[in-house]
């Protein structure tokens, strides 16, 4: 006999896609994937898509090639057979981390020329969660207008701006303040610093 509470638990698990672009900030992507690996009891499917530039930036910044060691389904940017390229797959969220301004611009313009921009379009049209972790600075007016457009369409612009009230004493802990907020934004529960719990 099937346990009804088990069915509810499975129903509440999320399908999450993570896209990594060639913007600087590979550490954000790596830490996110590490943390998601520890939340398997809340995730029914985890998929990863990564640009060639993202792999180059990862190797340059982190001096390793550990982007393909996570327990997830991997897809190329040209693989439109990926489940999250269609709303029928019922993915709950797409996190683009870090999100390049070129990627943001294509999303804002509705140009689905690769799996990342197509998946973002799907999240917006299905009213699902799209989180763009932008890292560039400073912003020009085009960037700002694109952020406005994506926000008005239902996406979430989450700049890779660390907070410091938790008193992070390493780069990794500062990066974690951004990653933990992203995890919150997609509706997952993780142990992290909470304001007021000093």
Image: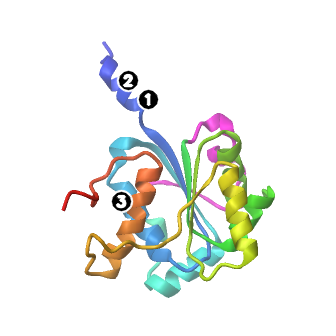
Q: Tag on residue 164?
A: none
Quarter holding the N terminus is: top left
**On the rendered structure, is 162 left or right of 105?**
left
Asked if one can make out residue 56 in the rendered structure from this viewpoint, the answer is yes
Q: Earlier in the sequence, mark 2 or mark 3?
A: 2
Based on the displayed image, in which of its 4 quarters is residue 12 positioned? top left
Q: Tag on residue 11?
A: 1
Quarter holding the C terminus is: bottom left
* Mark-to-mark CA distance, 2 and 3: 25 Å
Q: Residues within 10 Å of mark 1 (few under 14, many from 20)?
A: few
Residue tagged 2:
7
Q: Residue at x 37, y 72 (%)?
A: 163
Q: Tag on residue 35?
A: 3
* Mark-to-mark CA distance, 2 and 1: 6 Å
Residue nearest the observer in this picture, 155 or 92 = 155
Relative image position of residue 121 (x, y in whole percent): 72, 50
Q: Residues within 10 Å of mark 3 (few under 14, many from 20)?
A: some
Q: Secondary structure at mark 3?
A: helix
Q: Residues within 10 Å of mark 2 (few under 14, many from 20)?
A: few
Q: Residue at x 47, y 49 (%)?
A: 186
């Amino acid at each position: 006999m099937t346990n009804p509470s088990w069915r509810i638990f499975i129903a509440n698990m999320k399908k999450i896609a993570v896209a990594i672009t060639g913007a600087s900030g590979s550490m954000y992507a790596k830490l996110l994937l590490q943390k998601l690996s520890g939340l398997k009891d809340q995730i029914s499917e985890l998929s990863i898509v990564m640009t060639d530039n993202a792999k180059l930036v990862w190797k340059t910044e982190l001096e390793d090639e550990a982007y393909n060691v996570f327990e997830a389904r991997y897809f190329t940017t040209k693989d439109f057979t990926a489940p999250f390229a269609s709303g029928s797959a019922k993915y709950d969220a797409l996190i683009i981390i870090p999100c390049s301004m070129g990627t943001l611009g294509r999303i804002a313009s509705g140009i689905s020329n690769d799996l990342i921009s197509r998946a973002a379009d799907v999240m917006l049209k299905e009213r699902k969660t799209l989180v763009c972790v932008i890292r560039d600075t400073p912003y020009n007016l085009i960037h700002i207008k694109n952020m406005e457009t994506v926000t008005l369409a239902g996406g979430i612009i989450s700049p890779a701006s660390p907070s410091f009230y938790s008193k992070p004493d390493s780069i990794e802990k500062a990066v974690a303040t951004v990653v933990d907020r992203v995890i919150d934004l997609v509706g997952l529960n993780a142990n992290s610093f909470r304001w007021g719990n000093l």
